[in-house]
Structure formats: C-alpha cells, structure tokens
Amino acid sequence: MAYETKALFRDDAYLSTAEGSVVAVNDRGGIILDSTNFYATSGGQPGDIGHFERADGSAIQIAATVTGETKSEIIHIPAEGQAALAIGEKLVLHVDWARRYRLMRMHTACHLLSVVCPFPITGAAVGDEESRIDFDLPDPSYTRENVTERLMEMVRANAPISTRWISDAELAGNPGLIKSKNVRPPMGNGQIRLVVIGEDGAVDSQPCGGTHVSETQEVGDIHIGKIEKKGKENRRFRIRFGSLPLL
C-alpha cells in the first residue's frame, strides 16, 4: 500500500520546522508521516536529514529521506538505534537547516548555470559543497572565468524566484521548458511545477520539484571550479561556493 504525504516544502522551502503525525512504519523501519517539510531525494537533490522531536522532548535522528512506491510517498529513514514510533504519534520535524539552505543555494545556482550554458543537460547532481551539471556542449569558448563572471552577474541582479503550476498540456505545447536531454518530468498527474526566475520568467522557467532560494542574491559567491571533458561534446561543469581562486 502506497501512502501520500503532504509535501510542505513544495509551497515553502524555508519551513525548517513543521508538525506531522506518523501514519505508517514500513518493514525496514522507514517512517511515513501525513505531512513533512523534509525533502526526499529526487531530481539530483539529496534528501534532507535532521531530527523528529517527540512529546517527551526526546529526539529521533533522521539519516535520509527518500520516496517510496510513488513520488507522493515520502519515507524518513532513522539512524541506527532510534526508538520505535507509534502510529498516530505527533512529532515536531526539524530539518538540518544549515545543510538544506546550502542545497537550496546550490540548486538555484544550477538553474542559473543552465541559463548561462543553454545546451541540453545530460546529467546533474546537487551537493551542499559542490554541484555538477553535464552539458552536450560543443562550443570551447565557455571557460571557468567567463562562466563564473556571467553567473555572478545573475546572482547580483537579484531576480525574484517563485514557483507556479502548469498543466501537462501546457508543457507539451512548450517543450523548450525541458532542458534535460534524457529525463522528462513526470506527467499524468495533471500538473507540473515550474521554477520561475525573474518577473514572469524573464530569466528562466523550467520544471523542477526541488527547493530553491527566493531571490538570486541569496546564492552568494559561487564559481566554476572545473570544466571536465566527458566525451566528444560532453562537458561537466563543477559549481563551488566562494570566489573563483586565482591560478
């Protein structure tokens, strides 16, 4: 049986604390709640870690968050040796906010990089220290220096970031919104979530279920740490926090 968890992070990525009730504990100890602010691993972004606070003040440490049988079922994986929870038990959910916020900044930086490099994306992974995007990019003129400069121009411009929902039909009628060469957003549920950068998407709009900051300046200083050749035309760009170091 698949459960449906209300994903609070989709409407408010800044919800570091929330409340939820236990609806199930699976045979591997995974905890399923009626609602959660913990993001589940998806789309290249790692799932959240943190802890659940019980009524008596004790804590259940959460080592990972993943999806279950469907994308709507969110499973919280406790660290080893945690106490068992009862069905119906009410909890206060505390995301490891420092880590989540770094992931939000990084995920937003990945969107900006896809604007600077408008080529098909062949792979991506978001991390709290370094992220990467692989592009089908034949143009050798993209360098660490000029890409970093353009990224920081977009960060400093401080464009607003928001989300909106479109229908499957709207996405089908505007296929240019999809930047991934190999992965398509899940369709069939009637709605697709768009992350919109700039007024009315002046900077970018693309399907994404991840968490992001609310304005580009929150990304802070970032730079391209390395560009690696992964094939005849495949290039891997590594994004890191901080200013571009002098060589």
Image (spheres, rainbow, N blue to C red):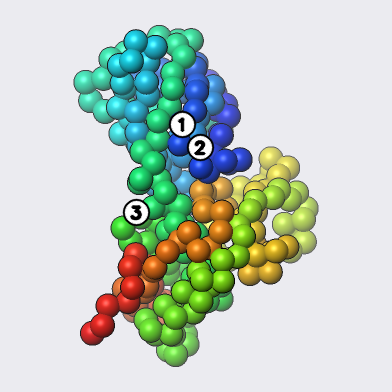
N-terminal of the pair, mark 3 or mark 1, is: 1
Which residue is pictured at 30% across the width and 27% down the height?
61
User: Residue 131, position in %: x, y?
Assistant: 37, 61
Which residue is pictured at 52% across the width and 49% down the height?
210
**Residue tagged by mark 1?**
17
2 and 1 marks in contact (CB < 8 Å) = yes
From this viewpoint, is residue 48 visible? yes
Which residue is pictured at 45% across the width and 61% down the height?
219
**Residue tagged by mark 3?**
128
- In the image, which is nearer the foreground, mark 3 or mark 1? 1
**Residue tagged by mark 2?**
15
User: Residue 238, position in %: x, y?
Assistant: 35, 69
User: Residue 98, position in %: x, y?
Assistant: 35, 45
Query: Amino acid type of disc 3?
Result: Asp
Callout 3: 10 Å neighbours few (<14), some, many (20+)? Answer: some
From this viewpoint, is residue 123 visible? no
Callout 2: 10 Å neighbours few (<14), some, many (20+)? Answer: some
Query: Amino acid type of disc 1?
Result: Thr
The kind of secondary structure element at disc 3 is loop
Task: Give above or below for 67 relative to 157.
Answer: above
- Name the one closer to the observer, 88 or 95: 95
Query: Rounded to the nearest whole Å, what is the CA distance between mark 2 and mark 1?
Result: 6 Å
Task: Give above or below for 179 relative to 141.
Answer: above
Quarter of the image holding residue 120? bottom right
Query: Rounded to the nearest whole Å, what is the CA distance between mark 3 and mark 1?
Result: 20 Å
